Amino acid sequence: MKSYILKNLSVCLLFFWLISIPATIAEAANKALILNYHHLDPAARSSSTISPQLFAEHMKYLKDHGYTVISLQQLKKYLLAPQTKGVANGNNGKGTLPDRAVVITFDDGYASFYEYAYPVMKEYGFPSTLFTIVGKVSNPSPNEIPKLTWEQVKEMAATGLVDFQSHTYDMHYLVNKKSALIAEPALKVQTDLRLAQDVLAFHTGRFVDAIAYPFGHYNRSLIHIARQEGYRLGFTLNQGAVQKGMNLMELPRVAVGDEKTTVQEFEKVLLRYLAQ
């Protein structure tokens, strides 16, 4: 009798373990790694600058090794969609993400994106998102790295491959080592975030509801203000992969836009966060 009970118990445990496997696999697959770049320069020297050659090698690695580059809009649809049970993995719709999903983002809106990165992205058909300091577009300063022009923004937005989102209008600076979005009065922050949305939407014809926090700095007050202004996604510089159920205003990204991130290191980053 005892052996009969143990045998049936073992069968039951095996059954529940087997039916849990698909859910576990789906949970592991349904995540995306958001890569973060800034500036491209053949003479790359800073911690946020990558050479065009190395950037092209990163993109080639993604293409050659079975990674799927998805748009920020596709990721947003997935994150905002109701949780779906029993849906087969590999669907590119709202229900799931493709295996090895990667989102490519650039911060600040440098002209070097148009010159060096955009041609490579077009060649591979990779979508990307530029978190843009909106007030710097077509507004050059003599002591700053050149930024994009509105003509370039409109040209790229029209292809559907490049999405433009907010990196503030004109509050990308520090106050006592804190981001201006945290240090300055709430009304000033609110006005800036709204202006960034309105101006970008006017020039691109696209809805703006995502923000990358300058310097990765944010707090509850800033998140509250951003939500009030209609922002639905907020991006940090916290490391990790994105999965459903995360706080949508504190989504992680991984910085890979420097010369230290060789192809070998790039591979390690991808495997670390997207290994099944």
Image (cartoon, rainbow, N blue to C red):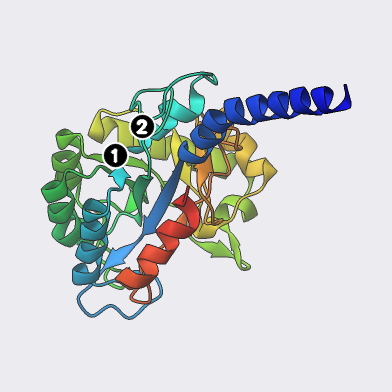
Q: Secondary structure at mark 2?
A: helix
Residue 172 in view: no
Q: Is residue 244 left or right of residue 104?
A: right
- The residue nearer to you, when weighing 134 against 45, is 45
Asked if the residue at tag 1 contacts the one at tag 2, i.e. Cβ–Cβ closer than 8 Å, the answer is yes
Nearer the N terminus, badge 2 or badge 1? 2
Taking 46 as reference, is 144 above or below it?
A: above
Q: Which residue is mark 2?
A: 73
Residue 201 in view: yes
Q: Residue at x 52, y 49 (%)?
A: 252
Q: Residue at x 60, y 37 (%)?
A: 246
Distance (Cα) linking label 2 and label 1 = 8 Å
| Mark 1, other Cα within 10 Å: few <14 / some 14–19 / many ≥20 | many
- The residue nearer to you, when weighing 236 against 17, is 17
Q: Which residue is mark 1?
A: 163
Where, by quadrant of the figure, is residue 128 drawn? top left
Taking 250 as reference, is 35 above or below it?
A: below
Q: Residue at x 58, y 56 (%)?
A: 217
Count the labels in the image.
Answer: 2
Residue 99, position as x, y percentages in the image: 38, 40
Residue 60, position as x, y percentages in the image: 20, 58
Q: Is residue 182 left or right of residue 58?
A: right
Where, by quadrant of the figure, is residue 224 drawn? top right
Task: State the mark number for residue 133.
Answer: none
The kind of residue tagged 2 is: Gln
Q: Secondary structure at mark 1?
A: strand
The kind of residue tagged 1 is: Asp
State which quarter of the image contains the N terminus. top right
Q: Residue at x 76, y 27 (%)?
A: 7
| Mark 2, other Cα within 10 Å: few <14 / some 14–19 / many ≥20 | some
The residue lying furthest to the right in this view is 2
Residue 84, position as x, y percentages in the image: 52, 19
